Image (cartoon, helix red, strand yellow):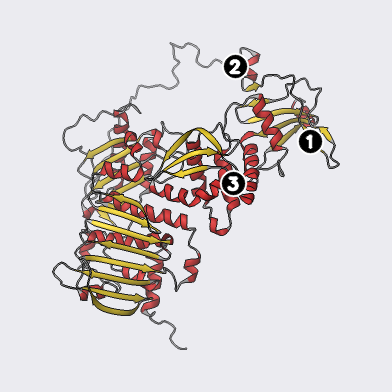
């Protein structure tokens, strides 16, 4: 039997490595920007076209490379930052494995120009799918410029799974934000399709946050600073009003490197536990400084998952620090940290003896001793007695709509075009009631009809927006006062891609510049909604649903906008309830919401009778 194990060709090995390191265009931007930072750059420019699928160009003014180093940089595991295995435990640079450029070159067309300060001419190298195309001298500025063209051109299966341009652009901006936040003293600029999206001058951390996420965030930030023998923590956390339903403004850094850390994120969530509604995510920009020998950043190909030696101690320090910061602003009860200098956090010694904790115990305590002060221990008490002192409390959750002599019971149209009454006109109950600001109740001939008001409104708006997209004839109803909506750069990039489609649905939204939109008009039927709130809800729904317009999913866009615009749990007047019912039964599919959830249910007389037997 012949041997079956063989060495892979370098080109195939590089493509496999690229699958781990380069997952999408944003991965290329991250690796190239990190190389620029390691080169000591003070100015970095990122230029992309078609969300990085056509071109990614990163230009810096760093130290540059010699002719030999430039060629060697594209070989696997070539690095200037690691000399021995011991160096892995004292890493101070962003990149160190020496696989990024080799992986990128295996799945794209690369052109690099680089020059050192002491060299009269620079070096230009062109590589296509790991194959050297040209290597020649060139006149260029000091630093390095790398162009990545036609990413994944030779791996069509990978290119096919890339998302819509708006989605890929959001990921690129996210990586850009992470590096820009880690290095506020560096000047950055970002261009997409020949338009400058961001320009960030060298500033302090707080100003960098404002430049990326809008000046209004400044009033919502709380200072955070703690020094301990385990790790130092500084940065900012957001006030409860800054929390959102989706992630996006959560940043951990350690030694100026972005990291993902679900365990530490849980410490933040628990610190906010009593002051945020369920499902809300607090914003934070937190910077750790730790001895490099106490952290491991070599546990994941993207170097974003980092392991701390004393993670539990750091978790407790972080949780306590956040609670202290919130307490200073009277957001939660304050924790008194009356200490000078470092906080002495005890950390377990792996080689030392383990002693049980001293727990005071009252050996004279008798749990069966009767409470003489109460004098009634053990007596049976009727739990239901006094629960409703007034029978009218049974109906406190019903909101009876004001009666109207002109109100007529809802009618439906039969197949032959005749109108027939759906509701029982002889019913003694009011025609419409609202329960818990969530359900509309009305008697019908067969029993009691229950309508989920939010889902009903979603169905109404969905069919309206779907028709508007198909016809492109929706007219915006002008707002009394234009509403300004400021957002972060990633959300602004998404909205810019969708403005034309939103215009077809009846929105009049215009680009005001500097990540700001102005809403001049909204679709009819959303007059009572807050335009800024609708935009934020729309972004939340759009990002979580992963809608892609290029895949012909404008129906998904209509669904997303319907969800964002639909009324939430709130009190409705009788006229509003009647309008929802009338429009609902005029829809093509009134019984189900756009995503297939039930809108209407009828509790029959027989079911009611069974409950009273």
Q: In this view, does 261 lie above or below 428?
A: below
What percent of the width, then of the height, locates residue 393?
62, 16
Q: Quadrant of residue 553?
A: bottom right
Q: Left or right of 200: which side holds 53?
A: right
Q: Left or right of 346: which side holds 459?
A: right
What percent of the width, then of the height, locates residue 36?
26, 61
Q: Left or right of 426: which side holds 58?
A: left
Marks 3 and 1 in Cβ contact (< 8 Å): no
Q: Which residue is drawn at 86% across and 41% down?
A: 416
Q: Of the residues under marks 1 and 2, which one precedes in the sequence?
A: 2
Q: Name, please, the residue furthest toward the left.
A: 118
Secondary structure, mark 2, is loop
Q: In this view, does 158 lie above or below 428?
A: below
Q: How crowded is mark 1: few (under 14 residues within 10 Å), some or many (20 or more)?
A: some
Give the spatial CA distance, label 1 vs label 2: 42 Å
Q: Residues within 10 Å of mark 2 (few under 14, many from 20)?
A: few
Q: Which residue is drawn at 21% across and 56% down?
A: 42
* Residue 559 marker: 3
Q: Of the residues under marks 3 and 1, which one precedes in the sequence?
A: 1
Pair 1/2: label in front: 1
* Residue 387 marker: 2
What percent of the width, then of the height, locates residue 350?
24, 50
Q: Residue at x 54, y 33 (%)?
A: 529
Q: How crowded is mark 3: few (under 14 residues within 10 Å), some or many (20 or more)?
A: many
Give the spatial CA distance, label 3 vs label 1: 26 Å
């Amino acid at each position: 039997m012949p041997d079956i194990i063989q060495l892979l060709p370098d080109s195939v090995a590089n493509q496999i490595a690229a699958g781990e390191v380069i997952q999408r265009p944003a991965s290329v931007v991250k690796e190239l920007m990190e190389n620029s930072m390691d080169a000591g750059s003070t100015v970095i420019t990122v230029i992309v076209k078609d969300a990085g699928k056509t071109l990614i160009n990163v230009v810096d003014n760093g130290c540059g490379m010699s002719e030999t180093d430039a060629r060697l940089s594209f070989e696997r595991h070539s690095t200037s930052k690691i000399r021995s295995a011991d160096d892995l435990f004292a890493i101070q640079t962003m990149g160190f494995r020496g696989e990024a450029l080799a992986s990128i070159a295996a799945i794209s067309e690369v052109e690099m120009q680089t020059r050192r300060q002491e060299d009269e001419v620079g070096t230009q190298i062109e590589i296509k799918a790991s194959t050297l195309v040209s290597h020649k001298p060139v006149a260029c500025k000091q630093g390095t410029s790398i162009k990545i063209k036609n990413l994944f051109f030779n791996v069509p299966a990978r290119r096919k799974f890339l998302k819509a341009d708006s989605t890929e652009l959001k990921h690129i901006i996210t990586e850009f934000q992470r590096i820009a936040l880690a290095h506020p003293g560096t000047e950055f600029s970002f261009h997409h399709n020949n338009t400058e999206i961001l320009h960030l001058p060298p500033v302090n951390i707080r100003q960098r946050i404002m430049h990326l996420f809008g000046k209004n965030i400044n009033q919502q930030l709380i200072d955070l600073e703690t020094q301990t023998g385990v790790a130092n923590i500084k940065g900012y956390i957001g006030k409860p009003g800054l929390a959102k339903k989706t992630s996006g403004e959560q940043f951990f850094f350690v030694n100026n490197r972005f990291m993902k850390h679900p365990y530490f994120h849980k410490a933040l969530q628990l610190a906010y536990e009593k002051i945020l509604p369920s499902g809300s995510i607090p914003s934070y920009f937190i910077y750790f400084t730790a001895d490099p020998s106490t952290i491991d950043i070599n546990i994941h190909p993207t170097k974003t998952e980092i392991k701390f030696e004393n993670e539990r101690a750091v978790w407790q320090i972080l949780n306590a620090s956040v609670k202290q910061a919130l307490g200073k602003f009277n957001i939660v009860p304050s924790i008194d940290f009356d200490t000078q200098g470092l906080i002495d956090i005890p950390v377990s010694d792996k080689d030392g003896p383990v002693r049980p904790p001293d727990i005071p115990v009252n050996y004279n305590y008798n749990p069966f001793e009767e409470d003489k002060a109460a004098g009634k221990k053990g007596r049976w008490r009727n739990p239901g007695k006094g629960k409703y002192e007034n029978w009218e409390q049974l109906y406190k959750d019903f909101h009876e709509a004001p009666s109207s002599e002109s109100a007529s019971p809802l009618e439906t149209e039969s197949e032959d075009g005749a109108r027939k009454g759906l509701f029982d006109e002889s019913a003694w109950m009011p025609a419409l009631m609202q329960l818990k600001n969530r359900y509309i109740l009305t008697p019908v001939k067969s029993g009691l009809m229950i309508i989920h008001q939010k889902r009903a409104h979603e169905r109404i708006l969905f069919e309206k927006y779907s028709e508007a997209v198909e016809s492109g004839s929706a007219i915006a109803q002008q707002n009394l006062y234009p509403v300004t909506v400021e957002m972060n750069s990633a959300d602004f990039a998404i909205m810019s891609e969708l403005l034309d489609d939103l215009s077809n649905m009846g929105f009049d939204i215009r680009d005001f510049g500097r990540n700001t939109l102005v809403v001049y008009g909204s679709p009819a039927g959303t007059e009572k909604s807050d335009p800024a709130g609708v935009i934020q809800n729309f972004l939340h729904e759009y990002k979580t649903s992963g809608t892609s317009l290029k895949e012909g999913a404008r129906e998904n866009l209509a669904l997303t906008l319907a969800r964002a615009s639909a009324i939430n749990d709130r009190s409705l007047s009788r006229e509003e309830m009647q309008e929802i019912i009338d429009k609902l039964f005029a829809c093509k599919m009134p019984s189900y919401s756009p995503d297939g959830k039930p809108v209407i249910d009828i509790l029959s007389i027989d079911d009611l009778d069974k409950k009273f037997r």
